[in-house]
Amino acid sequence: MLSEAAIKELNEIRQKYPDASAALLPALYIAQREFGYLGADAYEAVSNALGVPKAIARGVGTFYAMYKHKPMGRHVVQLCTNVSCMILGAEKLSDFLKNKYGLEPGGTTPDKRFSLVIMECIGACGTAPAMLLNDDFYENLTEKYIEEILEKYK
Amino acid sequence: MITITINNKEIKLEKPVTVLEAARSAGIKIPTLCWHEQLEKYGGCRLCLVEIAKVPRLQTACTLMAADGMVVRTETEQIANVRRGILEFLLINHPLDCPYCDKAGECELQDLVEKYGPAKGRYKEKKRKVPESLEDPVIVRNMGRCIMCTRCVRMCRGLQGAAAIDVISRGGHSHIEPFSGGKYDCEYCGNCISVCPVGATMSRLHRHGYRPWQMVNETETICPYCGVGCTLIVQVRDDMIKRVVPRIGSVVNNGLLCTRGRFGYEFVGSKERLTKPLIRIAPKLSADSYQLTANLFREATWEEAISLVAKKLSEIKEKYGNSAIAGIASPRCTNEDNYIFQKFMRVALGTNNIDSAARTGFAGAQNFIENIFGQGATANIIPGLSNSDLVFVAGGDPTTVNPILGLQIRACSRNGGNILTIGNFKGIEYCSPQKLAPVLYTEDVLLEGIVTALKNKKGLSGANPKLEAKIKDISTSIEDVKNICKIKEKDFNEFLNILSESTNPSIVIGKETTQSNGASYHLLLLSAINYLINGRIYLLSDRANEQGLLDMGCAPDILPGYRPVSYMEFRRRYESIWKSEIPEKQGLTIFEMIDTARNGSLKAMYVMGENPAYNLPDSKSAESVLKNIEFLVVQDIFLTETGRLADVVLPALSWAEKDGTFTNMERRIQRVRKAVNREGMEDWRIISEIAKNMGEKFNYSNVEDIFNEICKASPLHKNLTYEDIEKGEGIYPYKGEPLRDVMEEIRFQFPGSRSQGSDGKLYLRVERPLFHSGTLSRKSSALMKIYPHAVARINDKTANMLALQNGEMVRVSSKKGSMELPVIIDDMVDSSYVMLTNNFEGKGAFSLLAYQIDPVTKAPIIADMEVSIIKGRLKK
Ligand code: SF4
Ligand code: SF4
Ligand code: SF4
Ligand code: FES
């Protein structure tokens, strides 16, 4: 079930689009926020709220890789391993996350604190390696710096 | 005018079309995979690439509009190379299991590969493997064969309007899936499988039992299930129906079918079909006593059975008089069967005691509406619904009662029309209807409110003074609507604005209305709305020939052509053709028959293709009456609940084994054609034999003889021939004379005292499921697999209150009886009722119903039936 606030937000968004299916993408983001990821419940909630058939909601949702399609930890680390970041050691950082926190690409720590998503370029090539943690941006990463950053997210 | 040259052929086009359509119109074939003539364009498969002069790259013919002066080539070396390349890609992941794929022989991919072929693939990696899915009862999926043309998705989302499946994921991972990821759990119309170009989705009914080229014959006929009258192509081998498919271009259903029409044919070949006449040897017990047939009856020859029936009926007529005998006709039988049936009753037995299950709603409602607007008022073209700018639905979910008509409502919505409903109907939910859902049993107040508001807004034109006189008496304020129906003023006003602004509206009326408390008043109110918005009415009809049977005169008060028995001039007319006197006295309705038999003055009944011991409300009491009647003849294809009570059972041929005509709810007469052979007699032939045995002249050699007599006798059908029907000219008002000027006063009855739905009690409501139809669908194993047993549907609030889980056994009881069955929690069910079906053996909702009769429509009122529900089974 979506919270009342979410439904209100959804209805407001709906007004900005010519028809309900056009509002699907932002609606799915809201559902993702509410449910943590896009699963059957989230799609059904969006379908009920917008009046778009649930199979279509799921069809649209699964097309996009940037939605979360499985349950995630409380905080999501999105680490770039594209060319610049890779050259400056992003893959090592990924190994570090694995060894230190048990955090594998696409995986979640057993305590559900972190999930790791390997990203394509986030436009920070000049200050690579870089990552997003939830909506916060971090650059010039080192192992030590990552450790410090992660400490801030409980 | 657009002129375009394709392969050196000059083609002139009246209106803008695609290059593909232009080519097809000139008989030039361009290969396609994703394009399908029924579906929206997609342009995904690239197989239709063609060369356009002066355009550097190949273009997809299915999406490119033909432009004046365009020069197109459809088969060049370059094109063949490209197509070969595309096919090679398509085959990368294809399992190449053609030898045991049921599609082989009509597979578009196989045919194309055969034409352009990659003789040898270059792909060395592993193929994707998708196991065969048998999760669904009627559809088998081998998605490894899927080429992602998305035809099925476009069919399901577009024409079917169910949107049960979609493309999931993207790129190389994309695949077709229902929401659940597993079972389709959809409307099972099968329209997706009929557009699949390959063997990815197919009917499970003929899995590995059928090769398209082994088909011995194909017969075009009409669906035996509902009043829509869809055209079916029945494909047969070894006198067994192997597959039923639609025909693109057929007038009513144009290439679409519903689940019953497509998958419901197995009853024809059922081993339980009656084969020999049966004569009773054991005393009558009850209809559902599970005694073996062999212990109840002995087999008899036709001669013996026919002369026994003739003798007994003559004796009873002699002893008790003509009115001691009654007959029940069948909305599943052809016009010819029904015409002969009523003629037999009137001529051989001298009685107007003829009626049918149409009396449970359709007959009276039609009569009522025609009396206001003239004969033919409900004979409206079904595809016309999609062109309406508004469809107003009351009294039933059209998508389950008349599914193909339901699709037209969905199409209306897709075309931008407004859908308004009184109540919740699951099948039209995704049309985002504007809904007003009044508290149970307060619908009349809401309708009064609508009539009042419309009248004030639009005024009266004076065109129909009789109706206007009634409309003037109607006055219900918005306050009453708010207080009694619990409807918000804002919703009411919005609804009313849409309704009053419509310019081309249609009104769809279902059985919930025709069987409601105050049915005739409800019909008056709906007629008033129809009049005020200048709409047209569609009366849902759940049997294939319900309209035809009435037009054939299978009613106590009308003669063929819908002529009233009470008019001497009409009686004289038929008497001169039938060379026999017709009784003046109106006969008994089906409910009066039961009552008269109960008090002992009705002694014999002849039941043709109907199951009153199950299909009439308060069926248990009908059953006990039929059990005690002196002589009961039941003519049917199965031994029904009623058949078990008969003195003589006569086996008839089924719809697939005979010729004739059906008249659908548009009053379109269509040809039913024999598709398979079977020993036995058609209903009309059996009755004619009995009539002859009684000394009557019933000499017909075939159905056309009968039809010609009908068209001689009935002014409505005057001069119509089978030839006209074949040409598609069997559409109302035919060539004859509709009845116009015998309109009576508008009479109606207000709802009697009634319960209020908000009183916290539970009431019984009849579910009319998509997957079943009367008791016939029980014998179609495919439909039984989809919806296998009776359930009680309740709302989640009710479930919570009673602490019930989905699937738990409950006992539903009314003052008439009780039954045990599992519950299903269904959010479309109102918290004030329990929904039960009337389709499954021993679990018929009608056995829990008491009824009263609406004095005007003569239909049963089955509202207001209080039920209780308790958890668990009865402890024995
Ligand atoms: S059977 Fe009908 S409802 Fe089900 S997926 Fe196919 S088209 Fe859709
Ligand atoms: S299942 Fe058939 S119709 Fe549907 S996308 Fe695959 S090949 Fe096309
Ligand atoms: S809509 Fe009615 S007539 Fe058409 S296929 Fe379905 S049951 Fe048969
Ligand atoms: S048929 Fe034209 S792209 Fe598929």
Image (cartoon, rainbow, N blue to C red):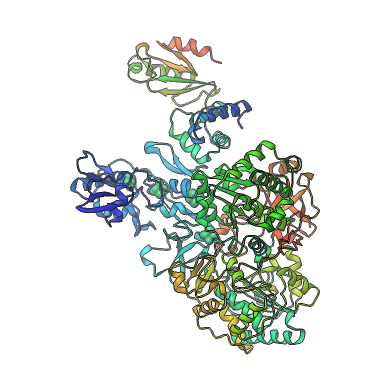
**Residue B184 placement (x, y as % from top left):** 51, 48
- Relative to B118, is B127 on the left or the right? right
**Residue B833 placement (x, y as % from top left):** 72, 49
**Residue B171 placement (x, y as % from top left):** 37, 36
Picture mark count? 0
- Relative to B636, is B721 on the left or the right? left
- Relative to B823, is B507 on the left or the right? left
**Residue B381 placement (x, y as % from top left):** 52, 58
Q: Residue at x 51, y 48 (%)?
A: B412
Who is closer to the viewer here, B108 or B556? B556
Who is closer to the viewer here, B297 or B603? B603
Residue B334 visible? no
Vertical placement of residue A101 versus B602, above or below = above
- Relative to B363, is B782 on the left or the right? left
Q: Residue at x 23, y 45 (%)?
A: B70
Residue B245 visible? yes
Who is closer to the viewer here, B420 or A58? B420
Task: State the residue lying farthest toward the bottom.
Answer: B695
**Which corner quadrant holds the C terminus of chain B?**
bottom right
Q: Residue at x 59, y 42 (%)?
A: B498
Hey, which quadrant is residue B637 in on the image? bottom right
